[in-house]
Each structure stands twice: as structure tokens, then as C-alpha cells.
Image (cartoon, helix red, strand yellow):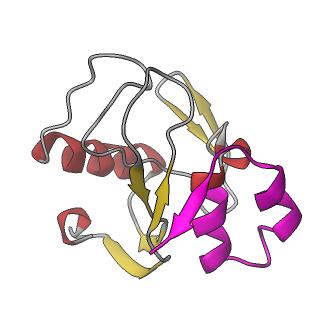
């Protein structure tokens, strides 16, 4: 989370960490997933740029869609805003399908994510 720190972006809290099976793509090891809540004055695109900066600094290589990766930082929501552009879609278009997103999101926003939505999503998760 410290790598995201910059002027105009403050991490407020984080979910627990979940170990999850990958969804889609080639066979690969499990991932560790969490969701953070932040306050920001950055625009949605500047926030995405901050996320991609973290990925680059950690050595992420984009060799294959949904392929193995060292880190993946996504913008799930941005207040009540909707963005639909080639490089950014908010809310994240597949977030409700993926248990590795909705389970940790429920930790932070139980009024937004129901147990039924978690159960209906794909993938296995294990809390740490």
C-alpha cells in the first residue's frame, strides 16, 4: 500500500488478504488479493496511472491476457462515477463475477456486497 502513496491519494483501510484461485487464463499459481479504500483528488485516469506505476515498479510484465503476473492493481469503483473508455471502465466490468474481488470488497462495504453476491461469484477464496 505504501507504493500507492502520493499527493492526492490516501489509503484509508484495507480488507483482509485472501488466497484465491486464478479465474481465466492459463494454469498458474494462486494469488493473494485484497481491496483497499482510498480518498483521492486524482481523476479516475490519474488514479489508474498511479496503479500502473505501482505495477511497473514491482516488475509486472504484460505478456499474456490473464496470464501469470506479480501484481495487478485495478480501479474497481470511483465514488458514484461511471467511466467507459477504451483504457478504463469503472465500475470494473467483471468485478461482480469474481469472488477474489467481491469477498474482500464485502469486508470493506457489507452494505454494497451481499453474501448472496459472494456466493454467486466464481472462484475459491481462503482468508489469511
Please state, as top left, top right, bottom left or bottom right, where the C terminus lies in the image. bottom left
Q: Write down the quadrant of residue 52 in the picture.
A: top left
Residue 125 in the image, given as x and y percentages of width and height: 58, 59
- In magenta stretch: residue 45: no
The relative height of residue 54 versus residue 1 in the rendered view (above or below) is: above
Q: Position of residue 68 (x, y in %)?
A: 32, 31
Q: Nearer the viewer, residue 121 or 128?
A: 128
* Left-right relation of 42 to 75: left
Toward the right, the furthest residue is 116
Tell me which corner region of the image, top left, top right, bottom left or bottom right, holds residue 116.
Answer: bottom right
Residue 77 shows in the view:
no
Residue 111 is covered by the magenta coloring: yes
Q: Position of residue 55 (x, y in %)?
A: 23, 44
Question: Where does the magenta region start and end?
Answer: 101-128
Q: Is residue 42 visible?
A: yes
Q: Residue at x 21, y 50 (%)?
A: 54
Q: Is residue 43 above or below residue 49?
A: below
Give coordinates of residue 112: x percent, y percent.
77, 70
Left or right position of 107 against 18: right
105 vs 17, left or right, is right
**Rendered position, 67 above or below 3:** above
Q: Which of 106 and 54 lies nearest the eye of the viewer?
A: 106
Amino acid at each position: 500500500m505504501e507504493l500507492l502513496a502520493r499527493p492526492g491519494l490516501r489509503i484509508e483501510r484495507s480488507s483482509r488478504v485472501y488466497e484465491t484461485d486464478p479465474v481465466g487464463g492459463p494454469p498458474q499459481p494462486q494469488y493473494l488479493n485484497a481491496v483497499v479504500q482510498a480518498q483521492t483528488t486524482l481523476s479516475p485516469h490519474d488514479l489508474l496511472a498511479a496503479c500502473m506505476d505501482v505495477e511497473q515498479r514491482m516488475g509486472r510484465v504484460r505478456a499474456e491476457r490473464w496470464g501469470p503476473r506479480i501484481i495487478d492493481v485495478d480501479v474497481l469503483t470511483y465514488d458514484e462515477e461511471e467511466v467507459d473508455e477504451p483504457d478504463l471502465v469503472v465500475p470494473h466490468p467483471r468485478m461482480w463475477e469474481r469472488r477474489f474481488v467481491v469477498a474482500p470488497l464485502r469486508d470493506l462495504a457489507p452494505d454494497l456486497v451481499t453474501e448472496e453476491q459472494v456466493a454467486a461469484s466464481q472462484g475459491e477464496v481462503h482468508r489469511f
